[in-house]
Amino acid sequence: MIPFGRADAAPPDGFAIVMLPLVGAGIGAASGVAGSIVARWTAEPWPALVAFAAMVLLSGAIHIDGFLDCCDGVLASVPARRRLEILKDPRHGTFAVVGMVLLALLWVAALQSIAPGKLLLALALSGSLARLAAVPLLRLFRYAYADSTSRSFDSPAEMAAFIALAIGAVSLAAMLSPWALLLLPAAFVLSAAIAWACSRRLDGLVTGDVYGAAIVLVEVALLMAIALLPWR
C-alpha cells in the first residue's frame, strides 16, 4: 500500500483519501501490465489470475479486508452497537469467507473476459474510479469513531488534487471507449448506495471498513461492466 497522509489519523486523513485514485490507477496499471505480459505465453485463466494476484499484493489487500469485515459486521443479525464491535474484530467469520469466494469468482471472471490488450486501461480506470467515487462519502456520512463526519477535503490543495484526478479518470475512460464515460456517474451512485446501505445497519454511521467495501464492490462492478458490455 502506497502511503499518503497521516497513518494515525482518525477519522481518515483527507489528503490520504483524496490521493487514493492515483494509488488505484497505479496499482491497476501495474496489474494490467502483469496480466498482459503473462498473456503472451499462456492462455486464460492465468493472465486474469496474475492480474488479480498483483492487485491484491500491491494494495496490501487493505480494501478487501474492509469488505470482509463488512460481510461479518454489517450482515450480522445483531444490534448496531454489536455490529460496530464486530467491524473492529480482526478475525473473519463465515460471512467473510463466503463473501471472499464470491467476490474472487466475479473478479477473476470479469478479468478473463477483458482482452489482454485492454487490461492496463481497464484496471487503471476501475482502480482509479472506484476510489475517486469513495472520496465524496467523507461529506455524506458520520464517521463511527468521531463526533462528526469524516475529515472532509477542504484545503485548496486537496480540492485541486481531487479535480485533477477526476479529469484523469475521464481521460482514462475516453481512451478505453466513449461509452466508458457512462461509468463515471454510475460509480459515484453505486458507491454512495453501498455506503448508505451499510450506514443503515450501523445507526447512520460508517467506518473505514465501509469505505473499503465500497471501493472493492465498485471496482468489481466496473470490471464486470467493461467485460460484459459490447464496447471493449
Image (cartoon, grey):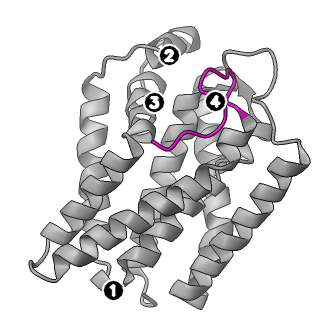
Tell me: 177 left or right of 136.
left
Q: Does 12 appear in magenta?
A: yes
The answer to whether any part of residue 25 appears in the image is yes
* Crowdedness near tag 1: few (<14), some (14–19) or many (≥20) residues, C-alpha within 10 Å: some
Q: Of marks 1 and 3, which one's residue comes earlier in the chain?
A: 3
Q: Which residues are magenta?
A: 1-13
- Mark earlier in primary sequence (1, 4): 1
Which is more toward the observer, 217 or 43?
Answer: 43
Q: Residue at x 28, y 63 (%)?
A: 51
Magenta stretch prevailing secondary structure: loop
Report if the CB atoms under discs 4 and 2 are less than 8 Å apart.
no
Residue drawn at (75%, 47%) of the image: 136
Q: Residue furthest left?
A: 42
The residue tagged 2 is 83
Q: Which label belongs to residue 200?
A: 4
Looking at the rendered structure, the kind of residue marked 2 is Arg
Residue that mark 1 sits on: 117
Cα–Cα span, label 1 and label 3: 34 Å
Of the two numbered discs 2 and 1 on the same chain, state the one appearing first in sequence: 2
Marks 4 and 3: which is nearer the front?
A: 3
Whether residue 131 is in magenta: the answer is no
Marks 2/3: CA–CA distance? 9 Å
**How many angstroms separate mark 1 from mark 4 (CA)?**
41 Å
Q: Report the side of 229 relative to 10 (left or right).
A: left
Which residue is identified by label 3? 70
The three-letter code of the residue at mark 3 reads Cys
